[in-house]
Image (cartoon, rainbow, N blue to C red):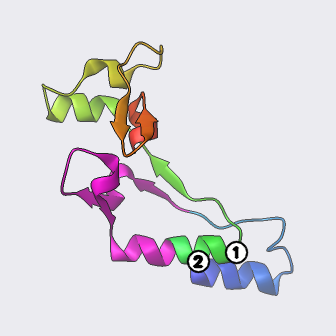
Amino acid sequence: LRNNQQALIKASVSNQVKVTVPLNADVYSRSTSLPSGGDIHDFVVQILKLQSYNNAPFMIDVYPFISLYKDPSFPVDYDFFDGNATPLNDGGANYCNLFYVN
């Protein structure tokens, strides 16, 4: 990413073109089932710093049905976005689907 960013700067297009890389949803580990219990991996922190410094987007590929496949007790309502899931409250933040939780 840094080399690509440097090339964009050298070509004077770093304000028009942004460097990013999509990462899987496993960019953090969880010690609890709550989103606030997540710890972001060190390499992701470095990417986030670079993205933030260059005002570039950060992307995560979230695959809701993998969660259901890996854990049969995973609440199915969180895989769909119809507003029928019971919100998960985590320290005052409410999550009603897997995209918000991740």
Left or right, residue 100 beside residue 36: right
Q: The magenta stretch spans which residues? A: 21-47
Left or right, residue 81 beside residue 34: right
Q: Is residue 40 above or below residue 82?
A: below
The three-letter amino acid code for the residue at tag 1 is Asn
Q: Could you tell me which secondary element the residue under label 1 belongs to? A: loop
Tally the numbered discs. 2
For the view shown, which residue lies furthest in the front direction? 92
The three-letter amino acid code for the residue at tag 2 is Leu
Tell me where residue 76 sits by quadrant.
top left
Query: Can you give x and y, in whole percent of width and height, for residue 50 in the image?
Result: 59, 77
Q: Read off the residue under disc 1.
A: 54
User: In what quadrant of the picture does the C terminus appear?
Assistant: top left
What is the C-alpha distance between the residues marked 1 and 2? Answer: 6 Å
User: In what quadrant of the picture does the N terminus appear?
Assistant: bottom right
Residue at horizontal 42 percent and vertical 27 percent from the top: 96
Judge the density around disc 1: few (<14), some (14-19), many (≥20) Cα neighbours within 10 Å. some
